[in-house]
Structure formats: structure tokens, C-alpha cells
Image (cartoon, helix red, strand yellow):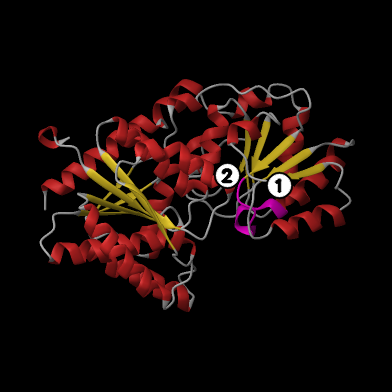
Amino acid sequence: MPNGKPLRILHCFRSPVGGIFRHVRDLAEQHSRAGHEVGILCDSTTGSGHEDKLFEQIRPYLSLGLHRMPIQRAIGFSDAAALYKSFHEIKSLKPDVLHGHGAKGGAVVRIIGSALRVRKYRVARFYSPHGGSLHFDPSSLSGRGVFALERAFERMTDAILFVCDFEKNTYINKVGVPRCTHRTVYNGISDSDFAQIPARSDAVHFIYAGMLRDLKGPDVFIEAFAQTERLVGHPLSALIVGDGPDRDKYRDKITQSGLGRRIGLLPAMPVKDAFSMSNIVVVPSRAEAMPYIVLEALAAGKALIATRVGGIPEVLGADSGALVEPGDPTDLARVMAKAVTTPGWHGATMPDPVAFQAKFSASAMARQIAALYEERLAAI
């Protein structure tokens, strides 16, 4: 803290689900414990009872409050009303730091933060893409438009924070080298998450836990599971845990594949509860930045099989035998079969636990980000 003065930090993002929400919760708790004042502004139309429980857990650390309002996913006329309401909400909080996460959160922070700066408010504007707009195809018309906006927003940004080198390099390739300060700070998880979670006596062979949408690859997991059974020559068991827009499609796919008795489908739950249901976690994403499920699974002592996307190779190691090609159920089935038939597979493919914890702890992440907040505020 500069001169012992706590910072007033407001995190803005759209949907309170998945990795962005986890990232913000961890930062809020760590920075609150360090003496800073923290608040959240996000969408009020997404999330479920599971997310409501997570908000209740984080409320004690939100001295600047929780502020929710409708923020649509797609760009539209409703954005004007959301920006107007957000401006007055944020102005009343008098933040020192505005940190936007994802495309919509980044836009809100930089537009409103810049408007406040015009009015002589001393506020620093930070942006973390978390994948977001970087998933667009630069050859498409929509992609070119999005990346042009990203470039323009750099003039309204005090610093961009990337969660892994893959995300930074993707930004550079699609948008260009940032014309503002930028840093890579790896996602981190809390010390309490670094604890072995033993599997229950009725555990299944494999588990998928995450958003139920095609980008995350549950359909690939279902196809790979069927192929894995054929490779090992006997029935296996699996669970898909989560909520999302494609849930009904995956339920139908399981039934149509004749796997209804061997692949269960459960709603979102605390990840530690999900981890108790299997010793092998599968992350079949088609695209990622730095997914928390990877860090959480390793911290819980689980064997992990994941696609070679985003920052995952930076966690497992580029040559890890646990990595598979995205969107390829045959390659995924190959490794799933190895995981259940090869003695010692877990120990030979997972990273060293001590080095992993030193690199991916929430306390290290929060210290680095707070230092950057203070550095950029001092430059205003």
C-alpha cells in the first residue's frame, strides 16, 4: 500500500460464472486481507443458485459492495443504459482502481474510467482479457471489428494483465504489441486449495467439471469415453458436472450413444465435491486462456488429461503425456485409456507439486497485481 493507504478496487465483468468469477473472488479475498477495499460490478441475469452461494462466501471481503445489473453478452442498444447506470454506480464508489475482466468488463472499465479521468478523478484502468475477444477469427469481419476496438481501447488503458504467455502472444498476433503497460501474472489458487482430495468408494473413472457449452468440449469427452471403453475392452464410468446453454444437447447425446447408465450428468457444485467423485479429471476444451479447473485439479492431487490449448502446456509442461489435441476424441481416448491401464501414469505425467504451488498460488498472484496497481497509480 502506498504510504500505508489502502486502495479502493472495483472489479467489473459480465457473467459471474467460470474462471473469471473464480479469478475475481480470489483477488477480492487476497486484497481484502491485505487491507484494501474491494467491490464487484457484474451482470444480474446470469448465474444460478451455485453462484449465489459463491457470492455469499465472498461478501465479507467486499467492503465496496456487490453491484449487479443487466449486462448483455452481445453488443446492443442495451449497453447504453448499462453504461449510464454503471457510470453513476462507479462514480459514487470513488475507486482508485478499475479492473475490467473479459471483453465487456474491459469496455466498461475503460470507457467509464476515462470519463472519470476527464472529470479529474484519479483512477487507474486495468484490463484482463481472459480469452474473451481473443477467440475471434482475425480474418472474419466481426474479428477485425473486435480487434480494432481492442487496439483503440489501449489508449484508454493503464495496463493489460495477461494470465499466461499464450494469452499475451495471442493478443500480440491478433491485435498487436500493446501500446500500454502489460504484464503476465499467472492465475493462482488459495493455499487451502492445495490439499489432496481422496476419491469416494463409489468414484467413477473420469470426470468433466465445467461450463456445458461446445467451446469447453463436453461433446468431445462423450465421444472419447465411448472410444476409451472399446480400447480397454470393458465398461467404464464417468460424470459430467456443470450447467450451461448446451446441457440438454449433451444429455441427448449421452442417451443416443447408449451411455446413459455409464455417464452421469449432475448440476454445478463446489469443485471440491466434484473432485471427490473421481481421481481423473478431463479438460477437453477447444480453447482456453488459463483455466482454473486445471490448477484446482492438480492442487487436489488429481490426475489430469487436458487439451493442448491456451496456457495449459505452461502448467503441465509442453511435452507432457497428459496433453491431447483439441477437438480430437480419438487422441483424447488414447490418453484416457493409458490413464486407467498404465501403472504409475499419474506420477510420470503430472508436474512437481512443490514447484507447482510456488508458481500458481493466489497470494503470489495478488501481490504482483497489487504492485502493478500501485505502480500505475503513481504514474497518473
Q: Is residue 180 visible?
A: no
Q: Quadrant of the N terminus?
A: top left
Which disc, if any, is residue 107? none
Mark closest to the chain's N terminus, 2 or 1: 2
Q: Which mark is residue 50?
A: 2
In percent of the image, x 65 and y 26: which residue is there? 346
Q: Amino acid at mark 2?
A: His
What's the CA distance linking mark 2 and mark 1? Answer: 33 Å
Q: State the residue at coordinates (63%, 32%).
A: 273
Q: Is residue 198 above or below residue 62?
A: above
The residues colored magenta run: 210-219
Amino acid at dot 1: Asp
User: Residue at coordinates 19% horizontally, 49% vertically from top-left?
Assistant: 96
Which mark lies nearer to you, 2 or 1?
Answer: 2
Residue 245 position by quadrant: bottom right
Instruction: Determine if the magenta segment contains residue 227.
Output: no
x and y, in percent, of residue 24 in the image: 40, 44
